């Protein structure tokens, strides 16, 4: 039977209230974010803005007529991918790709090793397809905060998502990659563009859907980009006289709140997760939204309730006390069970060394998962409503990618419900899963920029 949290586990219910965001608070968040975005866009406030709103130099959306053969690299999480994308027609796109695991040692080691590894994978991929001498155009999806100073030049600002490689911050990442390729001397490619995964996602979606104006990622990390009027992108030299009306802006929204403006909705659990992260006091919004952190938030709540004897009484395990052990995918699994069923919850707790079939406890666990994922979706809705209002569009599509959005059973519906609350019918929107933004999108950007 479906649980009644207030009656069945009142203490946990009270604790979970800390994660609730009221409608009024959601509206407040939209307003605060709008202000931060304006600060990021304007030249005089940009240097101290936390939401940087980097210009991407991508000013053309795809027309659907792009054709040709492109290489793409995708670095942004624990997997690194090399892709060969052939745009044959609007509907026919061939993608060959290979994934490589980025080890912990590489993620936290010297940047030179990371770029040598990337070049090595690229070289072996190209040799497999006999294209190492073709000098193909390459789009590099690099999904970290990057201050772009040209379509194929970007200065690394800071690492996120568990990466921390020395010798990269402050450098032009394209040059680091080119140097690593040159050191090998066995490969000819042209790095024509560097982009963020959100930009790739927007472009990939826009290829088939001309009304796409926002690219959103809710995966390991989270972020969004949108189409801004060039006349508002003051960080572009000649922004007032540019003959291209639009510019994709990579907001780097994960950092929203780093100056304290989200403290009014943060909980003690957010603080705990932040403290133990590799980048404390950074990426405040991302830590409330994205896949790298949601599972850990749930684990903290569970451990606190267990410590008070209010959950899984008499049971304990080493695993539940291990940091980062409770994965965000568990949240999606647990919430995928039909209402009132706790099969996945029991299985997952079993894997965590806590063997129980006490329904009330499993229902409580599910409630905690729902609380954390609902807050994530509410915050993401604030982001989308804010961008839609900022663009002043009456009708647009949003291209979305990332594991949280893709695999959580209710995330999409939660977004629609909360966006409707915020937009109050002022704009129509469509949320669309964007296929392979980091690969297909990178190829499209390479195509529009050569
Ligand atoms: C990065 C963004 C990226 C997002 C999603 C964040 O941690 O800073 O650049 O778009 O993750 O991958």
Image (spheres, rainbow, N blue to C red):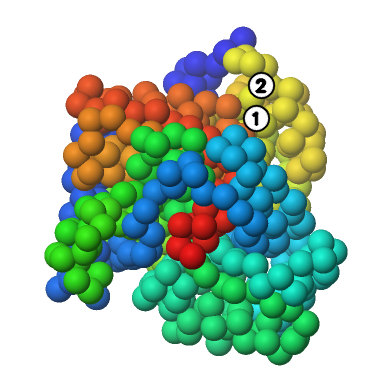
- Mark 1 neighbour class, 10 Å CA radius: few under 14, some 14 to 19, many 20 or more: many
**Any atom of ligand 1 within 8 Å of the CB at mark 2?**
no
The image quadrant that residue 150 belongs to is bottom left
217 and 333: which is toward the camera: 217
- Residue in front for this viewpoint, 414 or 215: 215
Q: Please name whichever residue, 447 or 357, is drawn nearer the observer in this view of the structure.
A: 447
Q: Which x, y percent locates residue 35?
A: 18, 54
| Residue 394 picture location, percent across and down | 23, 30
Q: Position of residue 315 (x, y in %)?
A: 74, 39
The residue most toward the top is 1
Q: Residue at x 76, y 62 (%)?
A: 100
Left or right of 214 in this view: 46: left
**Residue at the spot 20% in from the left edge and 26% down from the top edge:** 426
Residue 67 visible in rendering:
yes
Pointer 2: what residue? Answer: 337
Instruction: Measure the alpha-carbon separation of dots 2 and 1.
Output: 6 Å
Q: Secondary structure at mark 1?
A: helix
Residue 287 visible to an observer of this rendering = no
Farthest-out residue, right:
128
Q: Give the number of callouts.
A: 2
Image height check: is 207 above or below 224? above
Residue at 36% across / 35% down in the picture?
A: 211
- 25 on left or right of 85: left
Pointer 1: what residue? 334
- In the visual, does 114 lie left or right of 192? right
Do tag 2 and tag 1 residues touch (Cβ < 8 Å)? yes
- Name the residue: 23% across, 22% down: 425
Q: Which mark is residue 151?
A: none
Which quadrant of the view contains residue 435? top right
For the N terminus, which image quadrant? top right
Q: Is residue 240 above or below residue 287?
A: below
């Amino acid at each position: 039977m479906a649980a009644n949290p207030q009656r069945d586990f009142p203490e946990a219910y009270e604790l979970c209230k800390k994660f609730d965001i009221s409608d009024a608070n959601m509206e407040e968040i939209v307003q605060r974010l709008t202000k931060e975005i304006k600060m990021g866009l304007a030249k005089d406030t940009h240097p101290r803005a936390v939401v940087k709103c980097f210009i991407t130099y991508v000013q053309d959306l795809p027309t659907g007529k792009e054709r040709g053969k492109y290489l793409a690299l995708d670095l942004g999480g624990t997997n690194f991918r090399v892709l060969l994308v052939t745009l044959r027609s609007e509907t026919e796109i061939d993608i060959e790709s290979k994934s490589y695991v980025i080890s912990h040692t590489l993620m936290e080691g010297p940047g030179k090793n990371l770029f040598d590894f990337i070049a090595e994978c690229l070289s072996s991929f190209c040799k497999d397809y006999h294209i190492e001498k073709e000098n193909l155009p390459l789009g590099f999806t690099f999904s970290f905060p990057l201050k772009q100073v040209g379509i194929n030049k970007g200065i690394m600002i800071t690492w996120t998502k568990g990466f921390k490689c020395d010798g990269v911050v402050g450098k032009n990442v394209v040059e680091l990659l080119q140097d690593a390729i040159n050191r090998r001397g066995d490969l000819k490619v042209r790095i024509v563009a560097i982009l963020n995964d959100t930009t790739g996602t927007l472009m990939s979606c826009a290829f088939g859907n001309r009304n796409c104006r926002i690219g959103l990622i809710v995966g390991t990390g989270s972020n969004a980009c949108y189409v801004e009027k060039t006349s508002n992108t003051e960080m572009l030299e000649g922004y007032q006289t540019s003959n291209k009306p639009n510019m994709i802006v990579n907001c780097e929204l994960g950092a929203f709140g780093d100056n304290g403006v989200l403290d009014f909705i943060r909980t003690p659990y957010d603080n705990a997760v932040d403290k133990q992260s590799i980048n404390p006091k950074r990426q405040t919004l991302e830590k409330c939204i994205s896949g790298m952190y949601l599972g850990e938030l749930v684990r903290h709540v569970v451990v606190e309730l267990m410590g008070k004897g209010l959950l899984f009484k008499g049971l304990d395990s080493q695993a539940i006390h291990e940091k980062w052990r409770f994965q965000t995918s568990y949240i999606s699994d647990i919430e995928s069970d039909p209402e009132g069923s706790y099969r996945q919850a029991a299985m997952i707790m079993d894997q965590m060394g806590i063997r129980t079939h006490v329904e009330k406890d499993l229902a409580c666990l599910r409630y905690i998962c729902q609380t954390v994922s609902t807050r994530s979706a509410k915050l993401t809705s604030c982001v989308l409503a804010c961008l839609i209002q900022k663009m002043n569009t009456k009708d647009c599509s949003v291209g979305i990618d990332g594991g949280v959005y893709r695999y959580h059973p209710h995330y999409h519906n939660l977004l629609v419900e909360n966006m409707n609350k915020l937009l109050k019918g002022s704009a129509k929107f469509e949320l669309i899963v964007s296929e392979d933004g980091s690969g297909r999108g990178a190829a499209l950007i390479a195509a529009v920029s050569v």
